[in-house]
Each structure stands twice: as C-alpha cells, then as structure tokens.
Image (cartoon, rainbow, N blue to C red):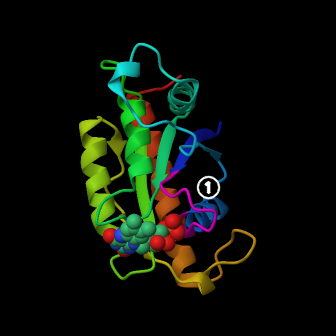
Amino acid sequence: MAYKVGYLIGSLSSESINRTLAEALISVAPEDLEFTEIRIDNLPLYNRDLDTAYPAEATALKEAIAGSQAVLFVTPEYNRSIPGALMNAIDWASRPYGENSFDHVPAGVIGASPGGIGTAVAQQGLRSILSFCNARQMTAPEAYIQFNPEAYGDDGTVKDEELKKILTDFMQEFRDHIARVLTVLPRS
Ligand code: FNR
C-alpha cells in the first residue's frame, strides 16, 4: 500500500528552484510514496471573518490535506522567514478554530536557496509554526539545500551524486517517519 503525500511548494514563481527541488525529491523517493501537489497560489488572503463561509479554494486546501497521509513542505526563505503565500496557506488550513488540518499529520520540511544557509532560518521558523499546529514533524535529517542548477537534470532528476544521496536518504527517512507516525496515529 502506498502512502499519499501532499506537497506544498512555498514559491509561486514559474521558475522556482524549490519546484525543481520538489521534482528531484520525488524522483528519488521510495516507490511506496505517492505524491500530489497541494496548490497554494489560488488562495485569497486569510480573514477570520470568513471562518463561517470558507472560500472554495481554502476548503479544497483543507480537503487535500485531509486526503493526504503526510505533508511535505518545500520552501524558499524570504527575509529570513517563510514566504507570505505559504504562511497564508497554513493560516487557512489551521482554521476554523478546532478544525486544524495539520493536527497529528506526519510532516517534512526542506528548502533550497541560492545562498549558503540554504533556507535554514525559514525552515526553523516553519518548524515552530508546525509545532504549534501539532503536526508530527520529522526532526532529522535536516536538509538545507544551496541550489546549484548544474546538479539537476532537465527532466526532474538529480545529476550530482552527492546531492542525490542526500535527497534519497532524506526521502527514505521521511517514508520511515510516516510509517512510524501512522502506526500510532492512523489516518483514513
Ligand atoms: C529572497 N531570497 C532570500 N534568500 C535567502 O537565502 N534568504 C532570504 O532571507 C531571502 N529573502 C528573499 C526575500 C524575497 C522577497 C525574495 C523574492 C527572495 C532569495 C531567494 O532564495 C531566491 O529568490 C530563490 O530563488 C527563491 O526560491 P524560488 O522562488 O526560486 O523557489
């Protein structure tokens, strides 16, 4: 049986290096992980006035998370934090009060940046947010990816062998983490 993983890309850019990273991660993932992108680009700005009348896009976001057995965040760092678009999506998914979509969900965090810290600060911030949202995060390994375009193929694969091993290990551990969490916290 495959585990359904919904992945969220923190960037809305058509040229996103984090989308490239997400494709690379999927290319090296264990075969029993099945991936679906959970889109965040169509959401209005969160407003609690709408908690009693959620927009269709936000309802679809919550349903997509509910239909996933795990979520994977692949995000850039913006101004030493996560992009507003991703925070907005998390705000929608965490509400209305008492209907937090991330409760007990197995979660993984990774990201790429052209700079040397490779989204480390953004990832730490995201971990704090996900802790509050009671997601069951994989805490290790961490992966702060400094993006080198030459390491990736045009077809979503990884050319660089060292990077390939890092990403493969990350996804294997993520798979094992999902299996462990679902053993004690099964999801339908
Ligand atoms: C950035 N960038 C950036 N990089 C970083 O390592 N730390 C940071 O704090 C920031 N801050 C930041 C703010 C804003 C508003 C932008 C637009 C960019 C650079 C960023 O890593 C780079 O643009 C990546 O290419 C963004 O990821 P995607 O969109 O290509 O996936």
Question: Dot 1: what SS?
Answer: loop
Residue depicted at 52% across the width and 48% down the height = 8
Return the residue at label 1.
Answer: 30
Residue depicted at 26% across the width and 42% down the height = 131
Left or right, 89 with respect to 42, comes to left
**Residue 165 location in percent, x, y?**
53, 75
Task: Say which of 27 and 6 sits in front.
Answer: 6
The furthest residue to the top:
52
**Residue 140 location in percent, x, y?**
33, 59
On-image quarter of the N terminus = top right
- Residue 159 visible somewhere in the drawing: yes
Up/down of 127 relative to 54, above or below: below
Q: Main secondary structure of the magenta part?
A: loop
- Residue 103 visible somewhere in the drawing: no
As for residue 172 lying within the magenta part, the answer is no
Task: Say which of 8 and 34 sits in front.
Answer: 8
The furthest residue to the right:
155
Count of residue discs: 1
**Residue 103 location in percent, x, y?**
35, 29
Type of amino acid under label 1: Pro
Up/down of 113 relative to 47, above or below: below
Stretch of the chain drawn in magenta: 9-18
- Dot 1 crowding, Cα within 10 Å, few <14, some 14–19, many 20+: some
**Residue 43 location in percent, x, y?**
52, 37
| Mark 1 vs ligand 1: CB below 8 Å | no
Quadrant of ligand 1 in image: bottom left
Residue 105, located in which quarter of the rendered image?
top left
As for residue 13 lying within the magenta part, the answer is yes
